Image (spheres, grey):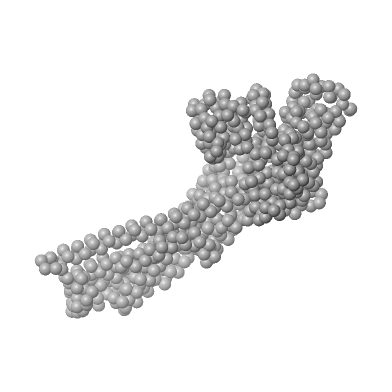
Amino acid sequence: MSTPESDMRRSKDARDGMDHEAMHEEELLGKAYDVRLLLRLWVFVAPYKLLVVTTLALTVPIFLFELAPAWIVKTGLDHHFQTDSASSEAAETTASSGFMRLFDPPEGVSEIAWLAGLYLIAMVVSSLLQFVNTLVMGRTGQAAMRDLRRKVFEHIQTLHMGFFDRYPVGRLVTRATNDVENVAEMFSAGIVALVTDVAKMIGFAVVLFLVDAHLAAMTFLAVPFLAVAAAFFRFKVRQAYRLVRVRIARINAYVQENVTGMKVTQLFTREARNFAIFDDLNQSHKNAWFQSIRYDAALFSVVELAQGITVAIIISQGTGLAAAGTLYLFIDWMRRFFMPLRDLSAKYSVMQSSMASCERIFQLLDTDPVIFDRQVEEGSRSSDRTVREGEGRGLIEFENVWFSYSAEPSEDEDWILRDVSFRVQPGEKVAVVGATGAGKTTLLSLLMRFYDVTRGRILIDGVDLRELPQTELRRQVSMVLQDVVLFSGSVTENVALGRDDVGLSDVQRFAESVQAHRFIESLPDGYETILGERGNNLSTGQRQLLAFARALAHGGDVLVLDEATSSIDSETEGLVEEGIHVLMEGRTSIVIAHRLSTIEDVDRIYVLDQGRVVEQGSHHELLGQGGYYRHLYDLQYAVGGGKRSEVQADALATAPL
């Protein structure tokens, strides 16, 4: 018997299994530190190479001005606190160099005041250089990432519907937002900072050896041990950081799932159990973060300890051998030498996150569009238009169409459509009916070329759809879906959808034609009312009325209605019936409808069963045949208790059993 405790244990085991898989994925992505990724990223940085060169060029003056403050203090100490002959000799030797003449004060200015002024100037210039460097680096990263984000969004729009069937929306949003931001962070706190830090560390080591090679050699004795400790903690921090990302991903997924399904949660009173599961996830995330913080703190402590040992070595080995200023110089520059090591784990985390995001982004960009425009010469299109010129525009032909969502369908299974052939004349109105899963919506998706047929072909005005540019095809075909998608913006913008040739007067005319004008006028701001996300401040019926107006504004020779009236109540359906007739007027129309009463007046009905056309004819003819359509009709009215018209009653009375 299932208990809350057993449910929790099973849930935890499942999460642990997913954590292991996610950790394995992170391990693979963590190996993405290769030249290939950086070279691909350089494509987006290259247009701003002048900014990159500026950033690198600023490294030298920034480093020099980081050296300057300690050298100024050294000069003051050497001149005023010489305690022995060795220090005096070192000070005199230094003072005689040409470089030290810079520190000689002008007439009438004390040496201390002059050195204090130089110190202030050095700090101000250093701060300004750091400001400019950060600004240029950030501008470079954001400009490059703007281009990368644009490329990602552009690529997403080229992908076919089959890709979106299997790729979670949340993951795509993450690729275009969070992942791009992670890569941008690499410029400000990752690879650029890492390179400049390494260069500075090498620079500090070189100048220390130039100042006093013997003391520098003694000072750097602790560095190899620190390097080993840093490598160890780097490995541990990497594992902890991966676990943190896995756990936060689990929290995000769980929160999204629960918010989306809040109605079900409250309906079945699962609040307490869901909270317990969330509390467990939250606790595991806290533990993972604590482990990461522990290793971070340990690394910081080790660096502080190494720095303290280094200062002790400088004092013990340098006293009596070097001037007081030299001792201060070594202490200050060694402190600056160790500063990048303190942030090693943070920089590594940024790099790991950025490179993993980079890998994911390029993995998406490497997904080739399956539906693409073929390069077909205008005169070489497989068209019979010379023969059919008198038929008008909007001729639709399905010729032996087979389709499967599987890449390698078997002969007996996986087929959604099987050898479907029919023809719709220009201006003709046909309907496609069938049980759920018969292939009706797939038929229309193929006509819109959201997918390509597996076998056979579909032609519009005698031209194979695969030889038509997608933009041209979709200008010819208007489609109204069952699930209407509205965008944030005004009613006018949602009807016109950005078409410059459709103004407010046109939108009003189209809305009146489909009986939408009345409810639009009742909105707070009429046609300028701003719709919420997906039009959630409108009823389902109102959203579909706007979709009818949009289809009318779109134009096109072919109209496709996919369950467009299934969610409209009887009263609203009566209002739009005339609008639908206006919508169909002069167009080739293909309608999918579960409500068989809505397709009584079409010219012809095609009945699908298991992907095949099993019957065709008018509504009256099909009822009279007593076949599969009659069966569907009887089932619908037996369940729904619908009211038959006199024509339908006569047809049923004379139909064979």
Q: Is residue 249 visible?
A: no
Q: Residue at x 40, y 59 (%)?
A: 137
Q: Which image quadrant for residue 568?
A: top right
User: In percent of the image, x 53 and y 34: which residue is there?
Assistant: 503
- Tell whether 125 sits left or right of 36: left
How far from the left and from the top, in percent, is residue 550? 60, 35
**Quadrant holding the N terminus:** top right
Which residue in the rendered view is the most extreme toward the left? 108
> Is residue 341 shown left or right of residue 454?
left
Left or right, 7 with respect to 150, comes to: right
Write down the quadrant of residue 477 in the picture. top right
Which residue sits furthest right? 656
In the rendered image, the vertical position of residue 535 relative to residue 398, given as above or below: above
Location of residue 160 in the rendering, given as x and y in whole percent from the top left corner: 64, 49
Q: Position of residue 127 (x, y in %)?
A: 30, 59
> Which residue is at 32% across, 61% downward?
129
Q: Nearer the viewer, residue 176 or 423?
A: 423
Q: Quadrant of residue 557?
A: top right
Please tell me whether residue 80 is drawn above or below residue 184 in the rendered image: below
Query: Is residue 422 at all visible to an observer of this figure?
Result: yes
Q: Residue at x 78, y 33 (%)?
A: 604
* The C terminus sits in image quarter: top right
